[in-house]
Structure formats: C-alpha cells, structure tokens
Amino acid sequence: MKLREYIAESFNKEYGYRIKLACDCSQEQIDVIEQCLAKYNLVSMSSINRKPIEENPIEFLKAKGVKLVTEVSSTDIVLKYPVNERILEVWLAVNLGLGHEQVIVYGVNDPRRLESEMAEERAENDVDRQVSEEDAELNNEDQAHYESENADLDFSPEMHYGEEYNAKFLAELGKLKAEKGADYFRNYPSKDELMGDSLRPVWDNIVNVPNMGKGAEQHKEVDRIAQSGSRSR
C-alpha cells in the first residue's frame, strides 16, 4: 500500500467506545462529556441509556471491585482519533467530578464489553427465578429449540446441521459398515497409542538409559594432564 493511500485510509477510520457512568447523568454532564471528547474529534454520541438504581452494579463490581448503590448511565461514542480506554476514563472522571471507579470505558471490540453484557443479562434473568433439573437447557432435545438458541448459525443440510443432515450421516455410516464390515470401525488407534503411552518404553530407553538405549559405553582411556602441563605416565 502506498503511503498516500495509507494516510487517506487512516483519516477515514473511526473508533467506537462505550462509556458507562455509575451516576445519574444530567444534561450538564452530557455537555461536559461532549466537550471532553471534542479533542478526539467526536463523530457521534448516542442518547444516554439509564438503568434503575441498583446495589453493586455487576459491571463496576467486576471491573473496578467497588460496591455502591447507584444508577448506571451509558452511551456509545465514535471518535476520529483513537484513545487509550484508561486515559479516557481518567479524563472523563476528572472533568465530571466523579471518582475514577465510577467511570468505565470499553472499546467497541473489547471482549470485556460482551462479557459484561452477558453477565447483566444473566443477572436480569435470574431475578426471582426458581430453577430445577427439568428446566436445564441440556434436557431440551428439541431441534427447533436448538436452532432458536443459535440464530447466528446456518442450519442448512450442506452446512452439516439439522435432523436431515444427521439422518443422511447415519445412512452413510450404515452403508460403509455394510461394505467394510463391522470390524472396520474397531481398527482405530487405542487410547495408549493416541496419548503416546505405548511409546513410553522407547522414551525410557532414550532418556533414562546411557547411550540412548544402546547400553553403557566402553571404557575409554583418558589422559590426565597435570597443572604443570606435562602428561602423566
């Protein structure tokens, strides 16, 4: 890539972040946030999403290790210039008059953001929930349920999913068994062969026996040279 193209591409690149505040974000604070982000060429800022007051918000407890009773306000921003998340946390906390533990900033692709969203979803779903073994997801063998739980997967037969593919797969196995015989499926490597245990004696010979398993070396005559440098006879 030419330098001119690289520079042009860098100017067109944008950087997304999610900001979370352990407070009720007022309009004045929203204005302060926009002023703080102006130095990074703020492209867009979503409206503030507010969650009700709760004790020890799981995200702040997990990320900052703090316990507090507060609302949680969040917004997604897009900047023209990249910034370190920790630096942005301090910059916002100082200007908003908040403690550093009350501000969290995640990059848009930060795995911790997805983890925190999943943790919050689990916490919401577990409120006043009474579970039993019958409710376990693994007990539900319905294919439609499996597909609904994995909406991002392609369940078409050619993608190796679904009951149609399973039936076709079992039919192919039956056909192969009829042609090759039942013993065909018994000629797989043993567990010892897969784990390398069958090679343990070879290893012991190479490592624990002198001369790599070939026995002790023959006695060799060794010259002893005195400190004076003359050979001893």
Image (cartoon, rainbow, N blue to C red):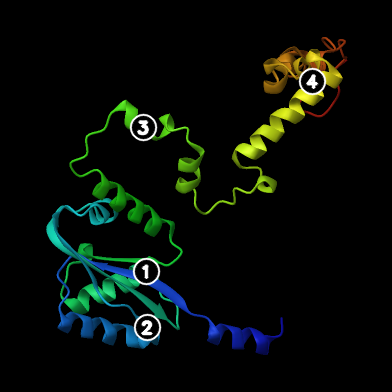
Q: Assign a secondary structure to mark 4.
A: helix
**Mark 4 sits on what residue?**
177
Q: Which of marks 1 and 4 is in front?
A: 4
Q: How far apart are marks 4 and 2 (CA)?
A: 62 Å
Q: Which residue does the image show at 43% across and 67% down from the upper left? A: 108
Mark 3 or 4, nearer chain start? 3
Above/below status of 177 relative to 96: above
Q: In the image, 143: left or right of 127?
A: right
Q: Where does residue 109 sit, x and y in percent of width and height?
A: 46, 64
Kindly identify which numbered label has been placed on residue 44. 2
Mark 4 or 2, nearer chain start? 2
Q: In the image, 55: left or right of 169?
A: left
- The quadrant of the picture occupied by the C terminus is top right
Kindly identify which numbered label has been placed on residue 85. 1
Above/below status of 109 relative to 191: below
Q: Assign a secondary structure to mark 3.
A: loop
Q: How far apart are marks 3 and 2 (CA)?
A: 42 Å
Q: In the image, 72: left or right of 136?
A: left
